Amino acid sequence: MGGNLHRRIRLLLALAVIGLAVTGAAAKSDAFEVRAWVDKTEATLEDQIFLTVSISGQRRLSDDPTLPPLPDFHVAKGGSSSQTKIVNGSISTSVEVTYMLTPRRAGIFTIGPVRLQKKGRTYQSQPISVKILPASSSAEARPMAFVTQHVDVTNPYAQQQIIYTFRFLRRVQSVEAQWDPPSFQGFWMEDLGKERQYEKVINGQRYAVTELKKALYPLSDSPDQIGESILTCKLVIQSKGRSRGTDSFFGSSFFGSRAQTVTKNLRAPPIPLRIRPLPQTGRPAGFEGLVGSFSVHAETGEQRLRAGDSTTLTVTVKGKGNLRDLVTLSPEDMPGFKVYPDKPTFELSVRGDALYGTKVFKKALVPIEQGILQIPPQEVPYFDPEKGSYRIASTAPITLTVEENGETESLHLVTAGGLPGSKSSIKILGKDILPIHTGLAGARSQIPSGTGLYAAFASLLLPPCFFLISYGRKRRQERLETDHHILRRKEARKTANRIVKEARRRIRQPEDNEYFGLLSRSLKGLVGDKLNLNTLAYTPVEIERCLREKGIGEGESREVRGFLEELEYDQYVSTRMDAGAREERFKKAQRLLARMDKRL
């Protein structure tokens, strides 16, 4: 009896131990560990900080962690990866999620705990403190790269030409530079040729310089500044502890196995402006808002004419300023002439650091009087910003001599035959008047019948139809040439396909992460061309916002954003990817391109 009791007690104790172990294992299986870290705790406004969140536990995680509020950073999700381990029969899983943080201002900030909610329990990481320095602040006395912008005149008159210059300077090699220019709202803008590439020495350091220039014309006195300009690029930086071996910007030592790329967001501060309105005092009659410095020249094809002849008056206006605003010349009426103006022609040319225009007006002049006639001076009133006063460019009067036309023309319809002095018969050379019909019968005889009637109607309708079709095609071509937005929309898919074609060549190169950059650029570029925006420098979140503003649904917009974030992660963070996964990225890019091309 005593033995049975002891066995029962031992059995109960074993069951209790097993129950406690199972309970502890169950509790342990529901536990998670949340950790967070950054790639750097001190950065500048030009840098990006990579925040990595790791969640590990005994169960697979299906939800993303919750980030704390980060109002001082622009946050973009970079991607995620998971891992499962089995050790001694115990299964453990871990998930890592990467976020890209772009600082908005300088200061010391705390990235609060990252939290995970599971079955009523909260798991969180330790807070992280980061220090953000002003742009170009670093341990080095001179920045590796920076941008500048300035104008040649900060207090111009309205409509005065000012030259805007943007420069990108760097001491190291840069790749994938994307410029987000100011909006230039309130200005008329003209490009001053292609970008320039040269070198410049600053404080003993040699910089490669990329320079862009634009001619701006303030449309009124309202613009008070040119906004901030941002350039995003990757700098190829040599790891410490290795000699460069050459001072060349593009030397091969830059691309050794220890070189790395660093993404920089370079900012040029806004430029304050004070636009002066044009004075009312002294404004001449016929002034059309032309501001600058101009000259005018006139000439005619012939200075001696016969009555009934015509000549062409050519007036050429040249100068520095927005000649697009010049519509007509005064005076428009010329006594003694009928005037038939032609459409003026306009050309732009770059001389030095300024933009010059040439506008040519042509008028056909038909004299209606005889004698000595005079073409009055052709005048162009304008405002000279250098002098601060109104001026009038004028030509000298041109004198024409109109003579009587001494040639006469007679029309002989009959001629007499036979010898002189003898009776002669009249020979009819031709008839110029058709028979006169006074009744319907005669008229009906002139109307074709059957297929001839249809042919007659077709011959009447074809010329106006041909004219309307030709006119419509001409207007469409002119609109495409003048409206760059329409041209961008029309060529959007072709441009994207060219980039995708380049990506296809790299699809079988597992070490080439630029493949993902090309796919991202094709999708961003198509959205930008469709919406007439410079979206290459936009983040995936900004692309999503643009799509929603244009009526694209939340699901599709989020899908585009997620795909762009995956491509950024693949390009900058992810390791080698197999050919099958790269092929899937390519197919998804093609699907989204086709969908966005139809929807936008």
Image (spheres, rainbow, N blue to C red):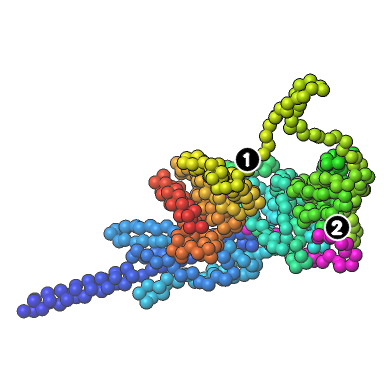
Q: What amino acid is labelled 1 in the image?
A: Pro
The residue shown at (90%, 51%) is 376
What secondary structure is marked by label 1? Answer: loop
| In this picture, residue 408 sits left or right of residue 439 | right
Dominant secondary-structure state across the stretch colored magenta: loop
Residue 343 image position (x, y, % from top left): 74, 48
In terms of depth relative to the viewer, which is nearer, 168 or 394? 394
Q: Does the magenta stretch include residue 213?
A: no
The residue shown at (35%, 63%) is 60
The residue shown at (23%, 73%) is 19
Examine the rendered structure and indicate whether residue 26 appears above or below residue 500: below
Region in magenta: 261-289
Residue at which label 1 appears = 435
Q: What amino acid is labelled 2 in the image?
A: Tyr
In terms of depth relative to the viewer, which is nearer, 144 or 165? 165
Q: Residue 131 occupies which quadrant of the picture?
A: bottom right
Separation of marks 1 and 2 at Cα, in angstroms: 65 Å
